């Protein structure tokens, strides 16, 4: 029983390590400025205040940023996941010359470092006339490599009888995908959706470059505005802005987390 | 070689075909898109890229709104683009993409690269009685003049000033003024160390981790050295090394100074007694510090002298005549004394327009808070920085990463500055041809 | 395209068919090809335009000297490559990148596996803790860096409050050349270790029980069973994590940008950061492109080698 007690101590320790920073973030947002910098630090806010959120919200048009982040995340995720599903289906079930080479080509995209693409993609987007538009924000990001990989790995695990039977039925490929394959892939689909949404939501450098006006900008840029306050960094406001940005993804993650476990696992197990 | 060249040409052709050609100096480029409110729809639009967020950003917005309401022909759209570096990057990328903002905030170390490569519009032909050499503060205006031609105008210009914590000084029994020399500052350290703050003894001086080379430019002069003479690097010579050595001893021998991620934040929260920081942060420091803030001249040592810095406004060359005229109208508006004074009262930046000093609001502010007059009075000691920091691309980064090594690792100053000098020389070589052609 | 060009894979049932069924089959195949092309086209086009075109563009720029504002680049051949590869600063950058990546990869795998074992024990609340451990993975790097920068602050940071009472002098973290890199590693591990743990956990739960039980009956102790049975069986998972972590860490940028800016000095200047520094701060487009291409090639080689090694091990086991 002694071993079990130690195991519980370790478990609690692990929880503290991962929750600690988040607790610190949240408690800082409701502290008054003087309390944030006091020494020794106060572990529990003396006086709760919403002031930091108010200041953060007023520092930049966060309502508009929220809207834009939501639009780009929803549309971007939709298009990217669609890409992933269609590509994965094709690679898993259809024949094509040099399929393997093509697949490596898709995976290779993962190895292209993000900021290497900034300048060329800015030029491309400018040529297309997409600067400061949703298209410019979204389209360059909808090519899918990792999500395609995960989906394909998953499709390969599905029993072939299912798809074969569907083919005998005369169901077209698209119907098979929609009626048979996708319903059997819910955990993986949720995983891919969440991973993609997180990526889109957190995207920072590209939106700053491709947009010009506040009306097109997204949340991470709001955070940047909070930080470029001349001189003194107001950690309370910055943390409030950070929390506003993180909260939606945390909530989505908590809702979807039991699927994600299953989904990611499959990609790895069959990797 | 021919094979390689052929491949290169092929690729070059490819990139050009895909719309990634290069800038031609006199082409007219389109305006970066944005959002124009319907009521301003039929005016000439001017796109102004800035680097001011937070309170300073709000002050820019107010000035622009005032301009837009003051006349019928021009609409200025402010587009915040991040830091000074971010603005420079984005202007460069836009030019390659054949777009050009009309006006952009360019920092003390970024406008030169646009000037050297013919991306800026010369401004002399736009000067009028209300907008020109007679209007602006001579020194600040002169920094953008090369061979008699103006390439930008001063806007958010600053010098460092010495901020000190009046409470801490009182507790330590020190006089209520900034130390006059670095030696005096050092001699005050032991007294300040007796003051407790944040669970440890108060430290004397915070040294900036990033961009500290701007303050250090002045320090080098104060110790009798220079970063460079022209583009000839001298940072590894006596005066500069002495300045570095003084700071090294403050950090590692006396343990009075330290490297801070954000000196302002530490100072505002009473962790350190003094720092050298831009006058442009005075307004927010005054409102955020929990103690009375003192401000004074940057100390001297064997000499006095300090670096000007901050942002000016450049007009892009690749835009239409109509847009240039409209942009000049806005620059003229900013040069009105009351607007220059407004900017100073809202931020702490220097009044770049001479007549702004007579503005009643600014006078009242300085009477009530003498701190706002410090940088103005100190301006007589200020001068333009050494050429290598101004014209050498990323010379500032090379210098401040060197300083980081001294602050963090106690590396011998001579050794650090020796290798910094090598990097600076390489950086200087890159711009040498253009510098000699356009500046000398 | 004739049938001869086609890949070898044919369905067994097709082989018995002959004669005019051939025509039918060819038509069906063509239809399948068409559908394939249709399904993958949008994705491949976007990837080609927004991932591979930039690489080609960079390959081109890497042969030039260009400050991004000058009217056009100057062709310099392979000068950027020879200069970069012989530059001691580049060697140091490469070394820092390797140490940084190595620490994070090893740390993620070891700690991830340990956590997976912990979460696999019949403990109350383990599900909740598992969720907590994974949660940082969905947070933005810039935001995570902001939180940790606040905690690492030598003046008022949480870590000072935790370490000082123990009687130790807390390190200066991001302001010290010795601690900045370990500090960054801590942040990345905090963000990523939950991901590794989750995947290892699923692997553990998927292991066949009989083998382990048989070994236990034979008297093999826990360690032997771990080394001889569990770890080899988890090899495919380790491989998956290895590749994804190496790729992710090599490209790590946001946390470094927010927390250290490559400093102090060059203590945390990784390849990824120096690409940014050369390209976007110094405007040396040619040199930044050279570094980009070098990095792309390194990643390509490393992952290919890993894949080869893994393939062999899986085959001969």
Image (cartoon, coloured by chain):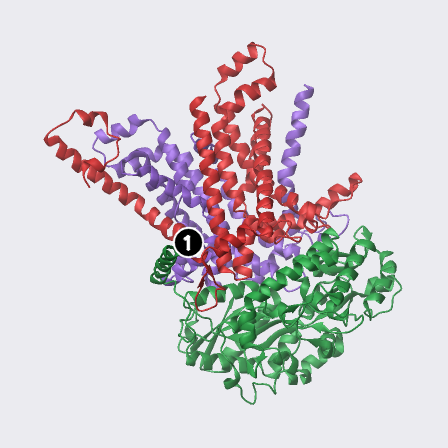
Picture quarter with the N terminus of chain C? top left
Question: Where is residue B102 shown, x and y percent of the image?
Answer: 47, 74
Question: Where is residue B62 shown, x and y percent of the image?
Answer: 56, 73
As displayed, is residue C173 above or below residue B242?
above
Which chain is painted in purple? A
What is the residue that sits farthest to the front in this orientation?
Answer: B1
Q: Nearer the viewer, residue A142 or B186?
A: B186
Question: Mark 1: which secondary structure?
Answer: helix
Question: Where is residue B29 shown, x and y percent of the image?
Answer: 40, 72
A256 left or right, relative to C136: left
Give the chain letter at badge 1: C
What is the residue that sits farthest to the bottom in this orientation?
Answer: B129
Picture quarter with the C terminus of chain C? top left
What is the residue that sits farthest to the right in this orientation?
Answer: B173
Q: Nearer the viewer, residue A19 or B376?
A: B376
Which chain is painted in green? B
Q: Nearer the viewer, residue B323 or A159?
A: B323
**Residue C154 appears in view:** yes
Q: Which residue is mark 1?
A: C54
């Amino acid at each position: 029983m002694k071993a079990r007690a130690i195991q519980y101590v370790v478990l609690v320790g692990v929880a503290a390590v991962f929750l600690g920073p988040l607790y610190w973030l949240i408690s800082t947002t409701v502290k008054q400025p003087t309390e944030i910098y006091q020494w020794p630090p106060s572990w529990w806010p003396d006086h709760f205040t919403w002031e930091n959120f108010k200041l953060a919200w007023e520092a930049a048009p966060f309502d508009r940023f929220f809207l834009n982040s939501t639009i780009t995340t929803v549309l971007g995720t939709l298009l990217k996941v669609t890409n992933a599903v269609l590509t994965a289906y094709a690679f898993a079930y259809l024949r094509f010359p040099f399929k393997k080479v093509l697949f490596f080509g898709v995976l290779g995209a993962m190895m292209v470092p993000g900021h290497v693409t900034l300048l060329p993609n800015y030029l491309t987007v400018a040529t297309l006339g997409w600067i400061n538009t949703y298209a410019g924000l979204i389209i360059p990001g909808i090519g899918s490599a990792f999500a395609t990989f995960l989906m394909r790995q998953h499709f390969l695990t599905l029993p072939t009888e299912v798809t074969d039977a569907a083919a005998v039925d005369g169901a077209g490929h698209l119907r098979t995908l929609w009626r048979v394959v996708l319903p059997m892939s819910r955990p993986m689909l949720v995983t891919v959706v969440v991973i993609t949404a997180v990526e889109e939501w957190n995207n920072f450098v590209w939106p700053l470059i491709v947009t010009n006006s506040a009306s097109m900008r997204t949340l991470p840029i709001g955070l940047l505005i909070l930080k470029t306050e001349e001189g003194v960094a107001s950690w309370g406001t910055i943390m409030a802005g950070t929390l506003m940005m993180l909260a939606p993804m945390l909530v989505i993650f908590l809702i979807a987390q039991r699927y994600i476990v299953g989904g990611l696992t499959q990609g790895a197990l069959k990797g | 070689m021919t094979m390689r060249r052929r491949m290169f040409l092929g690729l070059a052709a490819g990139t050009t075909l895909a719309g990634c050609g290069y800038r031609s100096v006199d082409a007219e480029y389109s305006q970066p898109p944005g959002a124009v409110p319907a009521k301003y729809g039929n005016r000439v639009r001017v796109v102004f890229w800035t680097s001011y967020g937070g309170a300073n950003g709000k002050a820019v917005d107010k000035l622009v709104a005032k301009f837009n309401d003051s006349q019928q022909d021009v609409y200025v759209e402010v587009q915040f683009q991040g830091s000074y570096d971010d603005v420079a990057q984005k202007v460069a990328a836009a030019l390659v993409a054949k777009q050009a903002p009309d006006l952009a905030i360019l920092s003390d170390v970024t406008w030169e690269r646009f000037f050297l490569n013919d991306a800026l519009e010369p401004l002399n032909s736009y000067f009028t009685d209300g907008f020109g050499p007679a209007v602006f503060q001579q020194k600040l205006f002169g920094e953008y003049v090369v061979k008699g031609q103006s390439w930008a105008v001063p806007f958010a210009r600053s010098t460092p000033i010495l901020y000190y914590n009046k409470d801490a000084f009182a507790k330590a029994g020190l006089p209520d003024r900034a130390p006059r020399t670095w030696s005096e500052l050092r001699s005050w350290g032991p007294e300040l160390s007796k003051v407790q703050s944040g669970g440890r003894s108060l430290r004397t001086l915070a040294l900036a981790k990033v961009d500290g080379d701007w303050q250090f430019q002045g320090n080098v002069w104060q110790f009798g050295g220079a970063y460079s003479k022209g583009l000839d690097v001298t940072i590894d010579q006596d005066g500069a090394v002495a300045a570095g050595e003084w700071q090294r001893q403050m950090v590692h021998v006396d343990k009075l100074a330290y490297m801070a991620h954000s000196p302002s934040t530490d100072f505002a929260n009473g962790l350190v007694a003094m720092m050298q920081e831009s006058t442009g942060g005075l307004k927010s420091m005054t409102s955020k510090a929990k103690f009375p803030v003192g401000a004074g001249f940057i100390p001297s040592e064997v000499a006095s002298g300090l670096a000007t810095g901050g942002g000016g406004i450049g007009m892009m060359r690749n835009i239409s005549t109509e847009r240039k005229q409209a942009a000049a109208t806005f620059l003229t508006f900013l040069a009105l004394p009351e607007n220059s004074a407004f900017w100073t009262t809202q931020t702490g930046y220097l009044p770049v327009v001479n007549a702004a000093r007579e503005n009643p609001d600014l006078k009242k502010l300085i009477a009530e808070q003498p701190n706002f007059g410090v940088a103005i009075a100190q301006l007589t000691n200020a001068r333009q920085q050494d050429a290598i920091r101004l014209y050498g691309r990323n010379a500032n980064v090379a210098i401040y990463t060197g300083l980081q090594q001294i602050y963090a690792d106690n590396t011998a100053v001579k050794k650090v500055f020796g290798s910094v000098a090598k990097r600076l020389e390489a950086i200087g070589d890159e711009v040498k041809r253009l510098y000699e052609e356009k500046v000398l | 395209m004739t049938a001869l060009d086609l890949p070898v894979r044919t369905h067994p049932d097709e082989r018995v068919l002959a004669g005019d069924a051939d025509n039918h089959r060819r038509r069906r195949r063509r239809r399948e090809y068409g559908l394939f092309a249709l399904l993958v086209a949008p994705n491949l086009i976007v990837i080609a335009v927004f991932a591979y075109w930039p690489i080609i563009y960079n390959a081109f720029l890497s042969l030039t000297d260009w400050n991004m504002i000058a009217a056009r680049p100057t062709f310099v051949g392979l000068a950027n490559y020879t200069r970069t590869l012989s530059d001691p600063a580049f060697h140091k950058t490469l070394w820092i990148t390797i140490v940084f990546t190595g620490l994070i990869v090893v740390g993620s795998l070891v700690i991830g596996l340990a956590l997976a074992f912990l979460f696999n024990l019949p403990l109350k609340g383990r599900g909740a803790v598992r969720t907590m451990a994974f949660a940082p993975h969905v947070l933005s790097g810039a935001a995570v860096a902001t939180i940790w920068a606040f905690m690492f602050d030598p003046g008022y940071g949480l870590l000072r409050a935790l370490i000082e009472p123990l009687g130790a002098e807390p390190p200066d973290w991001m302001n010290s050349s010795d601690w900045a890199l370990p500090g960054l590693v801590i942040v990345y591990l905090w963000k990523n270790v939950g991901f590794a743990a989750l995947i290892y956990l699923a692997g553990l739960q998927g292991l066949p029980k009989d083998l382990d039980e048989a070994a236990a009956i034979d008297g093999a102790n826990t360690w032997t069973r771990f080394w001889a049975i569990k770890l080899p069986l988890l090899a495919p998972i380790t491989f998956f994590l290895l590749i994804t972590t190496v790729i992710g860490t090599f490209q790590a940028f946001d946390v470094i940008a927010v927390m250290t800016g490559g400093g102090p000095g060059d203590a945390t200047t990784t390849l990824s950061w120096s690409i940014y520094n050369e390209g976007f701060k110094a405007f040396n487009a040619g040199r930044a492109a050279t570094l980009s291409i070098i990095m792309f090639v390194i990643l390509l080689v490393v992952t290919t080698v890993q894949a080869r090694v893994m393939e062999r091990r899986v085959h001969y086991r």
